[in-house]
Amino acid sequence: MSRARPALLAVGLAALAAQAGAWPAETMTALTRDARRLLPRSLSQLLGVREAQVQQEMARLPPSVSQGIARDLRGGRLTAETIAAVDAEVASAVQLLRQRRVSEGLVRLGGLARVTADLSDPVLAVGPEGWPRGLPREYYALFAANVGKMPVVLDYSLLCPTGAAAAPPAPGCSASVPPGLEAFELKRAGLPLIWQSLVERSREQVPTIREELVREGRVVSHDQLDFRSPAWAAASVAYSRAVTATAVTWLAAWREAHGDVTRMAPPRVVAPADAPAPAAAPDRRPSPPETP
């Protein structure tokens, strides 16, 4: 009986993940293509020609990874066991690359996009209360219909988290490093902090998804939501989060395998700016009559 319980738990977690859903294949293709734009040209091209194999690899994650992520997302924190399982996949990709089994290593590396995508998905991060029936379907339909319109925005605070959750700071992060190319120089040892940050931010979006997609006790059709909806904004932010974390994870492993990191275009930095002061309106009051 004691042996049967872990098996039943594994089956239950897998069924839970299947019921919750995940980003559709079209979205995952867009995600990996956007993430490749942030990579050195050599790595981007090598992954690009293996796009079909990478898509298949994402569906073959070990149960220790897929089930661990499904469980920990609902709990709100990655366990040491799950982190070790994901890191083992990174280490395997690095080892294959170092052994000059380049194609195998690249495919294994590309498959890690499934990890960062799931960790970035607020639908999978819901707690034990779960979702109303049909809500994940409508959220993913909203996502799939609009992903091509969602801009990718790199969040430097995700790459180098600050605060209590980030102590000690991630290796490679520095308060003096501005947003830009340097932010992608994280080492593999800093990746668990990035992955945990994804979990926390996904959990923060759960109330927004629930409030926007449930009205008067009924799930709202995705056809009724557009770019003005907070649910649309949450999906866009989650997508950017996944693209950023995917590129950072790939780069950390590629750098550890001594891959070529030259010809990497720096991202364009966009900073908030105060709106210009409005121009003074012309005085349209009638002029006083002239005195004769």
Image (cartoon, grey):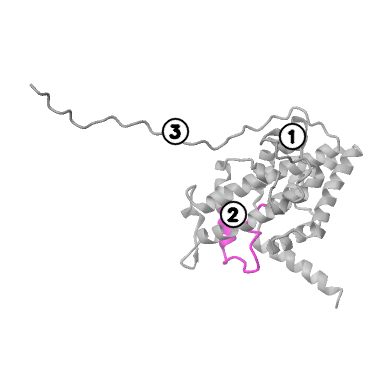
Gap in Å between the C-alphas at discs 1 and 3?
40 Å
Secondary element under disc 1, as helix, strand or loop, is: helix
Residue furthest to the left in view is 292
Q: In this view, does 208 lie to the left or right of 164?
A: left
What x and y, as percent, mark residue 168? 77, 49
Which range is magenta? 120-141
- Please name whichever residue, 12 or 228, is drawn nearer the observer in this view of the structure: 228
Q: Which mark is residue 276?
A: 3
- Please name whichever residue, 35 or 45, is drawn nearer the observer in this view of the structure: 35
* Residue visible at 72% across and 34% down in the picture: 182
- Confirm or deny contact between disc 2 and disc 3 (CB under 8 A): no
What x and y, as percent, mark residue 37? 68, 35
Q: Which mark is residue 140?
A: 2
* Residue visible at 77% across and 31% down in the picture: 42
* Residue visible at 12% across and 27% down in the picture: 289
Which residue is denoted by mark 1 in the rendering? 44
